[in-house]
Amino acid sequence: MPGSSIRAVEYTLGSQKLSFEELEERFGAEAMKKVFSGSGIRNRQVAPPGVCGSDLAYQAAECLMEKQSIDRASIDLLIHCTQSPDYFLPTTACILQDRLKLPTRCAAFDINLGCTQYVYALSVAHSMIAAGLAHRALVLTGDTMTQTVHPMDRSLVPLMGDAGSATLVEPAEAGQGFLAFELGTDGAGAQHLVIPAGGFRKPISAETAVEATDAEGNTRAPANMYMNGAAIFYFAISMVPKVIAALLRKLDVTLDQVDCVLFHQANRYMLDYLVKKTKLPPEKTHFFVEEIGNTSGSTMPVVLADAIRVGKVKPGALVLLVVFGVGLSWAATAVRWTGDAA
Amino acid sequence: MSEDQFVSLFTEAIGADPSAFTLDTPLRQLDIWDSVAYLAVMTMVDEHMNVVLPPDFLVGATTAREILARARQG
């Protein structure tokens, strides 16, 4: 069975900086000091009103194709990952196929997952290439989740940013590129990270716009994103070490033999604890959230691109990509890196 | 883990004054007993007692004594 690998990754951040100082004015200096000490996120890049996740994905894709001198006619699979689509229908991938001037023989579809979208999409691209259904895949991510957060929700505003990304996946020799995947779901935790209203289950109405303020002073309406941070943290520190262990068993290697483990960039406190709990030497991971925020499903391609830039991911390296979050959902992959070096 | 050790680690985790804190101090009377404190206690207990306490339990806990008892159950 032919393998596949990542050839290159590019990303685009939301163009507006939402600074620590702005949020100090909004939420108070003491509150922001506490948030920053836990999250490690000082500033965030957000998309202005009117910019969609697909716009960020589009910009990243154009950048990737130009830098890699890609013949657009050679792309026969477009997977676009988002939870903030342009429309309920058609699927945003179809719009991007036309916008990117990809051939009409290109399969195009969206994957509706959040924090785990990137690794799930890589698993689909890998599988379709292995099955002979595609030869060259463009995996895009793009979300503007900050637009779903109430501006006075202190539990989310300081954490979130917006980004899009583009990744080129191509066939590879056996033993190179993707070596294994580990995927999973626990939908029993769906209510812990949710936008309760706006879908078909609870359509937008006057009732869904009614704001309420919780015991910790966070204001939101049912049409806004809600996160039970403690429940997500519990899920992450309970599940992620098991996912890594399962992936290592599939590969029949130990963590010592892994060169770099990249995690979903939720917040610094969680990442530091996961590193400690998994006994991963800190130099074998990479953090890239302080100036951009948690960009939902784009955090993994963004941190991967930056890890390549700083030389932590280089040709020949064994790299784990580990993502977890809304769903609740998790995914991990092991990659023998063959793509771009810094 | 002894009760004294637990109090020391607990107060360090949530940033409370250890001289004014006992296992029976009502947690809900503390301004600092919030969602950030739940995470700090969750990691402290996991790190030192190898037990990940569910957040619903921590939200409902009224004293550190309850938390220690639950952690000791594993």
Image (cartoon, coloured by chain):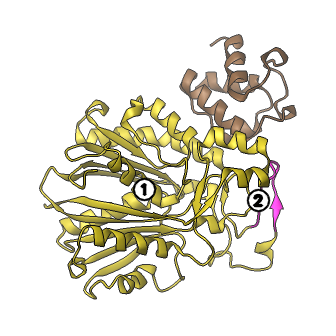
Chain colours: A yellow, B brown
Total of numbered circles in the picture? 2
Q: Which residue is mark 2?
A: A152
Q: Are marks 1 and 2 on the same chain?
A: yes
Residue type at mark 2 is Met
Magenta run includes residue B40: no
Residue type at mark 1 is Val
Give yes or no for contact between labels 1 and 2 (Cβ–Cβ under 8 Å): no
Q: Does A20 sit left or right of A30 as displayed?
A: left
Q: Quadrant of residue A62?
A: bottom left
Q: Is residue A56 above or below residue A10?
A: below
Residue sitting at 84 percent across and 23 percent down? B25
Going from the N terminus, do you reach mark 1 or mark 2 first?
2
Residue sitting at 43 percent across and 71 percent down? A57
Q: Which residues are magenta?
A: A211-221
Depth order, front residue of A67/B57: A67
Per the model, the C-alpha gap separating discs 1 and 2 is: 27 Å
Q: Is residue A227 above or below residue A170?
A: above
Residue A252 in the image, given as x and y percentages of width and height = 23, 37
Residue sitting at 55 percent across and 66 percent down? A15
Q: Which residue is mark 1?
A: A302
Q: Does A287 sit left or right of B69 as displayed?
A: left
Residue A23 in the image, given as x and y percentages of width and height = 72, 53
Q: Is residue B42 above or below residue A73?
A: above
